[in-house]
Amino acid sequence: MQIDDLNSCNISGRLSSYVCGQQSPDVSLAFLYYCAGKFLPVPATNNEYINDGLVNAEKWYALPLQNSTNINKTVVLEFIASGMNKISCYAINDMQQINTVNASEKTVSPSSRTLFSRPIIFNILVGADERNLILIHTINKGQLLYIPVTLYAIGPFGKYETNKNNFFGIFEGIFLFIILFNFLLYISTFDRIYLFYLLYAFFIGLFALCDAGAAPLNFKPVSLFSGQTYLFTGFAAWLFLMLLFLDLSKSNFIFYRLLRILAGIDLALAMIPFVLKLAGVDETTLIQTIYQSALNILFAANLLFIIITNISRLSYKNKLAIFYGIANIPVILGTLLYYTNYYHFTNVQFGWLNPIALGLSIETFALSFGFAYRYNLIGTEKRQLLLHINKQQKEISQQMIDAQEAEQKRIACDLHDELGGNLAAIKMKLQSFELPRQQSGLLQELIDKASANARNIAHNLMPPEFEHVRLNTLLINYYQQLSNDNTCKFTFYSSGNDHHFNKQEELMIYRILLELSNNILKHASATEATVQLIYYENKLEIVVEDNGRGFSADKVKGIGLRNISSRIKYLAGEINIDSGKSGTTIMIQIPYL
């Protein structure tokens, strides 16, 4: 392959590979095998990486390079080492000297890798007018093996790295925003769903970045399987997230206990590498193979469980289940593609993210909109519930007020008809008795006063002309009579259009004012009181003031105040009380409905 004017090119059609058997050849022997034709061509691909599928062996790759210019050339190969146990690169100068191997080696192994797997970059110097052979040695036990198929010159590789870093910078920024936003939601609402979504986004983001070799941190190595550790810790959070998102509980979900058990298994397998590391157990090929097989089975179990759960919720026509199911589609498709790649049925790559990481990332972003939809849905349900409760409360208040009105009408009728009639009969009977004039006059005077009081009480409870007279007219007459009969002088004012209320609402306002006036006469010891009704464009404002001794609104819980409050609440109004030693001011605002 000529690299004279190389910027970047696809090398898949020029690569060849050799699968090692029981014995692992060193670089010299591998070079001899290449010269002997034991390396087989690698099929060409237009993807960024060659998917070599599930590899549980050592492999050698060979790439011949030729520099026909009179200046040295440096080319770059980049490997994503998240799934590799070990990778080495050798540059063999002057391919004609078969017996003399002049190799430069660069090795990456688990002992030198970080917690977050970074790309492994090989800078290969090809001398002026020289032919080189690049030999790449990989050890990959039970993992998907991806080999880069693009060879870069130094300049174009820098631009490529800049673009990739920009992509992952945006990727990390979105995940960071999701994590911080949900943290703020959690500490403000203490709703566990935001905590699990935060954990899910955090671990899935780490898994995606680790798998792509783009994680920004550089910690000490913990385990070969750090990516899977993040993935299955994220899966545990995913299951609990689904539990809360779909509102699943013991009462409505028969697999509730199974879900918690599966989440526990996810966490247990995720922690196995850490336990092995702490115990000083070497990750042998057998341990790696068994562990990887267990993870594959558990991955399928998680995905199958989530699909079945979502389908079961769809049968209840759960709107959130529909959204959750749509959000899971990228994960399902990514998983299917990953495993068809795994077993060589397909050879599809999605740039810097593998299909599972890409699907999970898309789902994480989609769930952000799902949470917004859930928030609006719950808000709508709460508003509907609140409206229903308010309606019920209003109906109960109406029933109580209707009962009070009916009872007051009955009492007024009894006072006017029965008691008034009885007093009139007593007076007539008294006139037939021969009593001393002074005693007879005194008794008749008492009977007349009792009759007048009974008539006034009956009229106050239900004025006979109420249906035919405006409220303001009734109140003017009422307060004029109240001032004439009591030591407290009442002054009544009204302004504005008073045609905003029906007769039932006016009767409630009338009852409120009567109760307030009665309280002033009984408890305030006031000499003056003012009652104002001000009709604004959208509300009625009632102001009742007196110069009495005042009271504590927090301490007084009489029947009168409760009746006033219930009527004001029924009318959707508000009441404010300001009381002190110099008197009391009560302000009531009632909107026009």
Image (cartoon, rainbow, N blue to C red):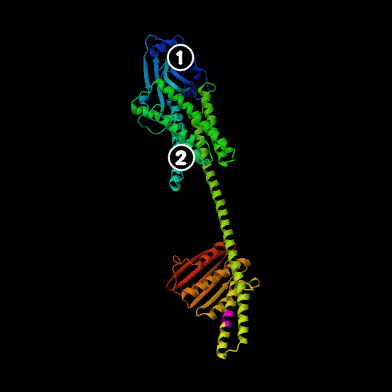
Residue 458 lies in the magenta stretch:
no
Alpha carbon distance from label 1 to label 2: 46 Å
Residue displayed at 54% across by 50% down: 382
- The answer to whether 14 is drawn above or below residue 352 in the figure is above
Residue hosting label 2: 196
- The single residue placed furthest to the front in the displayed view is 434
Q: Is residue 118 left or right of residue 436?
A: left
Q: Residues within 10 Å of mark 2 (few under 14, many from 20)?
A: many
Pick the quarter of the image with the C terminus. bottom right
Task: Answer with mark 1 or mark 2, whichever residue precedes in sequence.
Answer: 1
Task: Identify residue type, mark 1.
Answer: Tyr
Q: Secondary structure at mark 1?
A: strand
Q: Secondary structure at mark 2?
A: helix
Viewer-proximal residue among 445 and 509: 445
Residue displayed at 41% across by 25% down: 121
Magenta-colored span: 447-452
Q: Residues within 10 Å of mark 1 (few under 14, many from 20)?
A: many
Q: Position of residue 227 (x, y in %)?
A: 43, 29
Query: Which secondary structure class fits the magenta region best?
Result: helix
Viewer-proximal residue among 458 and 352: 458
Q: Position of residue 370 (x, y in %)?
A: 53, 41
Residue displayed at 44% across by 65% down: 554
Residue hosting label 1: 18
Q: Position of residue 315 (x, y in %)?
A: 59, 38
Q: Position of residue 468 (x, y in %)?
A: 66, 72
- The single residue placed furthest to the bottom in the displayed view is 437
Task: Identify residue type, mark 2.
Answer: Phe
Residue displayed at 50% across by 29% down: 301
